[in-house]
């Protein structure tokens, strides 16, 4: 910012282009620009990418900054983003960052303090980009703990004359949440770990993660509360809460999915606890989305927001098709319809939500109806009812408790049509 205050010509071309590409989203919020025609975004994007690639031959820290900012930009086709390009650009940024030593602890290096702090923040920015991209695109992470030497961020790394800014706090807490997400991906979403379908074992692995998430959520400062809306300002606090629900749901969907696959778990208290936890989380997540105001919707959203908005809907779908009783199934059908309606209303003001609506109403729900001859509309036929929130302990009742149609076998359920676990819908 000190360089920019002197002159924009002091900023390296790739970084300046990436900043402008992000800032163009709020062109009409500026009284001087709102009456002017917007710049040619396609040309600016092309020039920025070309200059980023050229800078990699003699990379600087600004090269990594530019690449990371470019990855936050709205895709050229927001409803059909190029995931392969985003994944490859993330991989390039990580590789060049490692060449610059951003995966190492620079605390003892003989470099200026500002560079030491910048290296640390950039290192964690690359780490977060890699982990969240892996989640959103269904890819394995590149970074391993054995080859990561950067120490965790602290408030001192964002210290300013007025104290740590809200943006600094968001980055700080997102970094710690990303560490938890990395554990989730290693535990539940590697090529080998996805073959584990024993519900009891998965629940044992998940419990420490839930504890970490609960402590993380309770530690959030008031400045990051979704209700903290400064007057006449946009608020990006929605990112941190959406990310929290996204991580939690990605743990729960592994547990819920396992209950419908062989070997079937007959631990009734464990199954009940999973359904109750899933119910509470789904309701909290949908209530959070419904509480977003225009100040949130028009603010900055991280690149992974479209995926997280859609994964809440896919989680509702998973709860719908694994329901144990007609009344529960009707509840989740109505919850899914209400969530879709909320997204449709908000999609006019928010590109990530528009993407989520497109994914949910397109690939996921059409795939669900094709695989299970199941519709989101209507109600379920009257059938045997178990006590709400509980499993029937009888083996016959349990086997048929899913209640899709008479004689339905949960072992034959084709969850790949709607569950992101198979990566089939992430393209």
Image: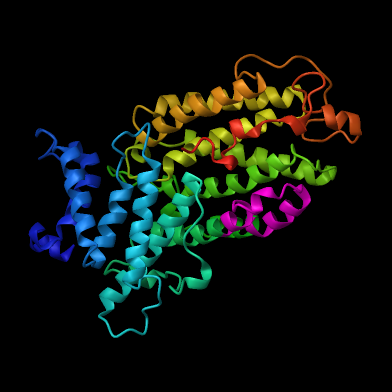
**Number of labelled discs?**
0
Q: How has the structure been colored for display?
A: rainbow
| Position in image of residue 45 (x %, y %) | 21, 44
- From the viewer's perspective, tell me whether residue 41 is left or right of residue 414: left
Of residues 393 and 298, the one nearer the viewer is 393
Residue at screen point 15% across, 60% down: 12
Residue at screen point 78% across, 51% down: 200
Indicate whether 327 appears above or below 322: above
Residue at screen point 66% across, 29% down: 320
For the stretch drawn in magenta, what is the main secondary structure?
A: helix
| Position in image of residue 292 (x %, y %) | 43, 37
Residue 223 lies in the magenta-colored region: no
Asked if one can make out residue 301 in the rendered structure from this viewpoint, the answer is no
Residue at screen point 54% across, 46% down: 245
Range of magenta residues: 183-209
| Position in image of residue 222 (x %, y %) | 45, 55
Dividing the picture into quadrants, the one containing residue 63 is bottom left
């Amino acid at each position: 910012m000190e360089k920019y205050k002197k002159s924009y010509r002091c900023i390296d071309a790739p970084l300046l282009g990436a900043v402008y590409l992000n800032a163009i989203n709020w062109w009409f919020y500026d009284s001087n620009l709102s009456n002017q025609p917007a710049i040619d975004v396609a040309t600016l994007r092309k020039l920025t990418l070309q200059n980023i690639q050229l800078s990699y031959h003699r990379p600087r820290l600004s090269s990594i900054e530019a690449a990371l900012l470019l990855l936050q930009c709205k895709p050229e086709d927001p409803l059909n983003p190029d995931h392969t390009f985003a994944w490859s650009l993330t991989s390039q940024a990580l590789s060049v960052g490692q060449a610059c030593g951003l995966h190492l602890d620079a605390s003892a290096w003989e470099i200026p303090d500002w560079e030491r702090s910048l290296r640390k923040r950039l290192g964690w920015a690359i780490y977060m980009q890699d982990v969240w991209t892996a989640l959103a695109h269904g890819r394995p992470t590149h970074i391993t703990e054995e080859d990561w030497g950067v120490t965790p961020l602290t408030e001192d790394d964002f210290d300013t004359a007025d104290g740590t800014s809200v943006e600094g706090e968001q980055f700080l807490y997102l970094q710690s949440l990303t560490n938890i997400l990395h554990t989730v991906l290693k535990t539940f979403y590697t090529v080998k770990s996805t073959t584990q379908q024993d519900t009891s074992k998965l629940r044992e692995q998940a419990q420490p993660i839930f504890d970490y998430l609960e402590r993380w959520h309770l530690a959030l400062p008031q400045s990051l509360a979704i209700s903290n809306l400064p007057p006449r300002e946009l608020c990006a606090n929605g990112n941190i809460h959406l990310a929290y629900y996204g991580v939690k749901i990605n743990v729960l969907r592994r547990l819920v999915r396992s209950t419908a696959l062989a070997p079937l778990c007959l631990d009734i208290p464990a199954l009940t606890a999973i359904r109750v936890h899933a119910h509470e989380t789904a309701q909290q997540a949908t209530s959070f989305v419904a509480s977003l105001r225009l100040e949130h919707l028009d603010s900055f959203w991280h690149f992974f927001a479209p995926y997280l908005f859609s994964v809440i809907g896919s989680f509702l779908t998973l709860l719908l098709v694994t329901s144990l009783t007609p009344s529960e199934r009707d509840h989740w059908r109505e919850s899914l319809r209400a969530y879709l309606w909320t997204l449709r209303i908000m999609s006019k003001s928010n590109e990530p939500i528009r993407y989520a609506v497109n994914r949910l109403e397109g690939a996921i729900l059409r795939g669900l109806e094709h695989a299970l001859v199941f519709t989101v509309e209507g109600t379920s036929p009257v059938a045997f009812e178990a006590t709400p929130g509980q499993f029937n302990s009888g083996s016959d009742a349990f086997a048929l408790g899913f209640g899709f149609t008479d004689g339905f076998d949960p072992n034959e359920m084709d969850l790949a049509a709607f569950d992101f676990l198979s990566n089939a819908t992430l393209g």
